[in-house]
Image (cartoon, grey):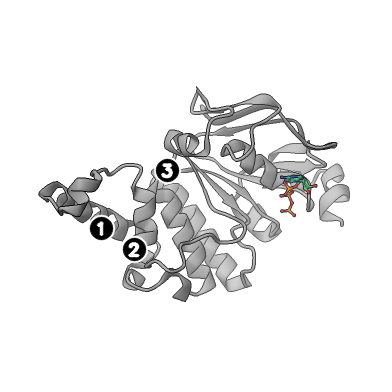
């Protein structure tokens, strides 16, 4: 299997704290991959390194063969990585539809003057964007909520909308940071179905951070377990979760 993501020897320190150390991870195209580990292990820091929020002290990140190490967040997004956040970050005072359209701006363009004068090209692009955004909302069963304010959606739906907005940027790799955080068991079950569906429907490669072991064992094919910024175990989900070191360091806590 060809790799979508290749991470080699990634390290970063904050002051004296080595938050991520000599971290390696390969994710095959189309894989659903989990990153787990105790609180403070460095999982979110790895997402921040992959998305250019932090620049690594050492190491290489390649997306679909392209070196993206140390690039700016916006350029990494254009290269094909989109993410969601541990605490939902929607534009709460914008409509559901407009939240998705924000994501589409990577790919649809008109200049300001065309916009102000409402020239035909502006209207054509707007129409295409509305159609594309509605298509995405349909996938998540949110099209009937298109005109609502994002903040009026129930929590589980806001999570879905955040995923829809990330997908609107047309990524190659989707990063989900604790998508099930704060969800009840029913919402989590629905979310698992949504994530599996997104993988199939968009032929997407997905990396997720998650503490909910039911979700992790239910949908992830491979895992990396992180402990104190280092890889503790890596491989097929069932093997990793039965590894005595993993049970002691993480699952047994
Ligand atoms: N910008 C920063 N400055 C200083 N220390 C930081 C910074 N970002 C993260 N850290 C530290 O790096 C370590 C790893 O944090 P990180 O948030 O990546 O852990 P995590 O595995 O995502 O934890 P959780 O499961 O609780 O979200 C922690 O000790 C944290 O305090």
| Residue 42, numbered circle | none
How many numbered dots are placed on residues in this image? 3
- Read off the residue under disc 1: 130
Q: Secondary structure at mark 2?
A: helix
Q: Secondary structure at mark 1?
A: helix
Q: Earlier in the sequence, mark 3 or mark 1?
A: 1
- Read off the residue under disc 3: 203
Examine the image and state in which quarter residue 13 appears: top right
Q: Residues within 10 Å of mark 1 (few under 14, many from 20)?
A: some
Side of 212 where 175 appears, left or right: left
Q: Is mark 2 within 8 Å of ligand 1?
A: no
Q: CA distance from mark 3 to mark 1?
A: 23 Å
Q: Earlier in the sequence, mark 2 or mark 3?
A: 2
Q: At x 52% / y 39%, what residue is drawn? A: 73
Whether the residues at callouts 2 and 3 have beta carbons within 8 Å, the answer is no
Which-is-in-front pick, marks 2 and 3? 2
Q: Position of residue 236 (x, y in %)?
A: 67, 40
Q: Residue furthest left?
A: 120
Q: At x 42% / y 55%, what residue is drawn? A: 165
Q: At x 71% / y 27%, what residue is drawn? A: 57
Whether the residues at callouts 3 and 1 have beta carbons within 8 Å, the answer is no
37 shown above or below 193: above
Examine the image and state in which quarter residue 109 appears: top left
171 shown above or below 198: above
Q: CA distance from mark 1 to mark 2?
A: 8 Å
Examine the image and state in which quarter residue 237 appears: top right
Whether the residues at callouts 1 and 2 have beta carbons within 8 Å, the answer is yes
| Residue 97, numbered circle | 2
């Amino acid at each position: 299997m060809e790799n979508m993501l290749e991470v080699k020897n990634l390290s970063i320190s904050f002051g004296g704290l080595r938050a991520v150390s000599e971290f390696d991870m390969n994710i095959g195209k189309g894989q659903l991959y989990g990153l787990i580990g105790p609180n403070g292990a460095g999982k979110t820091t790895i997402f921040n390194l992959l998305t250019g929020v932090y620049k690594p002290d050492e190491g290489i990140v390649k997306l679909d063969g392209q070196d993206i190490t140390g690039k700016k967040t916006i350029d990494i997004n254009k290269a094909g990585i989109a993410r969601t956040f541990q605490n939902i970050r929607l534009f709460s005072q914008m409509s559901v539809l407009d939240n998705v359209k924000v994501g589409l701006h990577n790919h649809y363009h008109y200049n300001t003057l065309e916009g102000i004068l409402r020239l035909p090209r502006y209207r054509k692009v707007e129409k295409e964007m509305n159609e594309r955004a509605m298509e995405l909302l349909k996938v998540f069963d949110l099209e009937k909520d298109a005109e609502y304010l994002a903040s009026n959606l129930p929590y589980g739906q806001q999570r879905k909308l955040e995923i829809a907005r990330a997908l609107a940027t047309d990524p190659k790799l989707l990063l989900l940071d604790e998508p099930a955080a704060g969800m009840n068991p029913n919402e989590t079950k629905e979310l698992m179905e949504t994530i599996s569906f997104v993988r199939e429907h968009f032929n997407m490669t997905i990396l997720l951070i998650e503490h909910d072991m039911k979700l992790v064992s239910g949908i992830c094919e491979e895992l990396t377990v992180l402990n104190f910024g280092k890889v503790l175990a890596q491989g097929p989900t069932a093997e990793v979760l039965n590894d005595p070191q993993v049970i002691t360091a993480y699952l047994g806590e």
